[in-house]
Image: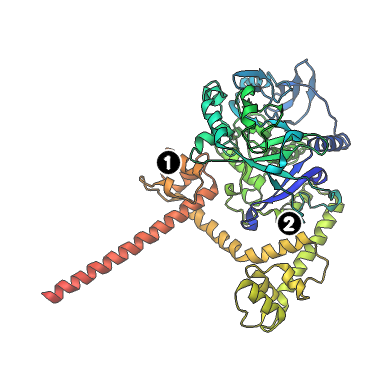
Amino acid sequence: GKVADRTYLQRRVLNRSKGPAVWALRAQTDKKEYAEDMRRVLETTENLFLREAMVTDVILGSNDNVEGVKTFFGMEFRAPAVVLTTGTFMNGQIWVGRQSMPAGRAGEAPSTGLTEALQGLGFEADRLKTGTPPRVDATTIDFSRLEAQPGEELPRWFSFDPEGRVEREQMCCHLTRTTEATHKIIRDNLHETPTYGGWVDAKGPRYCPSIEDKIVRFADKPSHQIFLEPEGRTCPEIYVQGFSTGLPENIQLPLLRTLPGLEEVKMLRPAYAVEYDFFPAMQCASSLQTHKISGLFFSGQLNGTTGYEEAGAQGLLAGLNAARTAKGLDLVVLPREGSYMGTLIDDLVTKDLREPYRVLTSRSEHRLLLRADNADARLTPLGRELGLVCDRRWQLFQEKQQRVEGEKKRLQSVRVSENSDLAKMAAEVSKQIVSKPTTLESILRRPHVHYNVLEENELGADAELTAEEKEHIETDVKYAGFISRENRMMKKTAQKHKRELPSDLDYMNISTMRMEARERLTKFKPKNIGQASRIAGVSPADVTALVIHLSIEDRKQSMAAAQSDKERSRNKVALTEKS
């Protein structure tokens, strides 16, 4: 997060049209700057030593514990704990059409031997695939025909530590769309792709599909958005987001030139698909330590995930627990309800996932509690307890919490009359009349009333609150009722896990569940809620949606039964009177 705050090209908040519970900060970073900055961090970290080699085996002790690793050239590195985080490199094979070569990434050799060594120890392996889009030359794009996607001037950063934040000029991304000509080329050449041609059957990411998957799966859509994202401030490469493909290279350039603004584009690097080995994470505990070998931790795409955030989160926990193993300390397990990291890892180790996994807000039934703006309040105390938060950072955190809690108390205690300027402005903004004296907290809870309304009426905070602190306070105030309701719903959900499910239940008509969940439930037809919750691809949020759906159906049936009873009673009375 700190490196992203120093090297970003653009920052935007995703899902801004929805509630704060699903807002997500996204940064486009300078590829070269990020790599150089992160390498500097690693090389200057005390007691961290870097060594490059291809690991082909793990060294075991007499008690099924890891004691180190062996390299391709026969070197042994001894350690009481080992983290394997192999990305897409284990027996990696990249494909461009029918052509393939061993590689974990374009221009980089794969890792060989390690899969077979782990299988020899009893681990189960499988194959997954992912892809990357082509890179094109920015100087050959007609940006005048594209829709600009500028960055946002935001009070948001990835790190809560202000020391690493760098204000810098943002670069613009651009939006184009596929055309009918794009779709025709793809449909005419599906047989030339690894997946549809039949020579690769590994599962790809459901939520980041290739362009050919989009055309096939969403055949009714006349067009798909394509984002053009710069890769750096000093290089001409443009990343064609949403356009990953396994088509042959000689087809990719004509395909790119069907996109508006790219009619004369030059391709710098072709898109490719990559197939690689992974080890289903159900072979790990919630600490990411493997069940079979103590001291051995799996992390990242090795566990079947896809995406940088997912890999980084696992690396943090696996690295922390490896260090604690080396020091003889207890391992750390993150509760599911406490963070998206906890949700991610709980899903990985409790479900038999066979397609690349991504963290989505819909994966968590607690997303109202897991907002980005309260991440430090949730996790900094734990980080401090584990020795990951320094004295300076802890002091900053405590000072912030004092400001926030102090302001919340002020909002609860200060009252204004119904005739005050603030009450009148709040009524105008929210379209709700203020009919009696009320607190600032009550005013702020109203729809469309934001913190700046208090400030405009000289009723803002006494302390110097930052923009992000004001937003955090406002969100806590507005969401208080929803959070309380969600806590009650969680208890009810737990009680209903034993509930039987109708054998004829039509899951495809339950629109509040994700399509993936509806498909899995239709296929497996679970007997009860608890069984449904353990099916891979069915998140706790989907289970909650299912419980709510069943409750609504129960209510409808009860009302129908009550109405039927009333009708029978009326008919009985009518017959009696007639007699």
Q: Residue at x 72, y 68 (%)?
A: 451
What residue sits 70% from the left and 74% below the top? 440
Q: Residue 153 sits in which quadrant? A: bottom right
* Residue ranking furthest to the left: 579
Could you say whether the residue bearing mark 2 is in a helix, strand or loop?
A: helix
Q: Nearer the viewer, residue 136 or 328?
A: 136
Residue 59's spot in the image, x, y percent?
A: 72, 22
Of tags 2 and 1, which is closer to the observer?
Answer: 1
Label 1, on which residue? 522
Asked whether residue 121 appears in the rendered view, the answer is no
Locate the N terminus by quadrant: top right
- In this image, 276 relative to 139: left or right? left
Marks 2 and 1, Cα distance to the nearest angstrom? 40 Å
Q: How is the image coloured?
A: rainbow
Left-right relation of 471 to 7 = left
Location of residue 576 with respect to 359 vertically, above or below? below
Q: Quadrant for residue 301, please give it.
A: top right
Residue type at mark 1 is: Thr
Residue 125 locus on image (x, y percent): 59, 25
Q: Which residue is mark 2?
A: 377
Q: Is residue 8 left or right of residue 290?
A: right
Q: Mark 2 or mark 1, which has the lower sequence index?
A: 2
Question: Mark 1: few, some, or many residues within 10 Å (few <14, many ≥20)?
Answer: some
Label 1: element kind = helix
Q: Residue at x 14, y 76 (%)?
A: 577
Please tell me which residue lies in front, 200 or 230. Answer: 230
Q: Between 249 and 69, which is closer to the camera in this rendering?
A: 249
Q: Is residue 414 visible?
A: yes
Above-or-below relation of 238 to 572: above
The amino acid type of the residue labelled 2 equals Ala
Quarter of the picture containing the C terminus is bottom left
Measured as percent of width and height from the top left, residue 371 is found at 67, 54
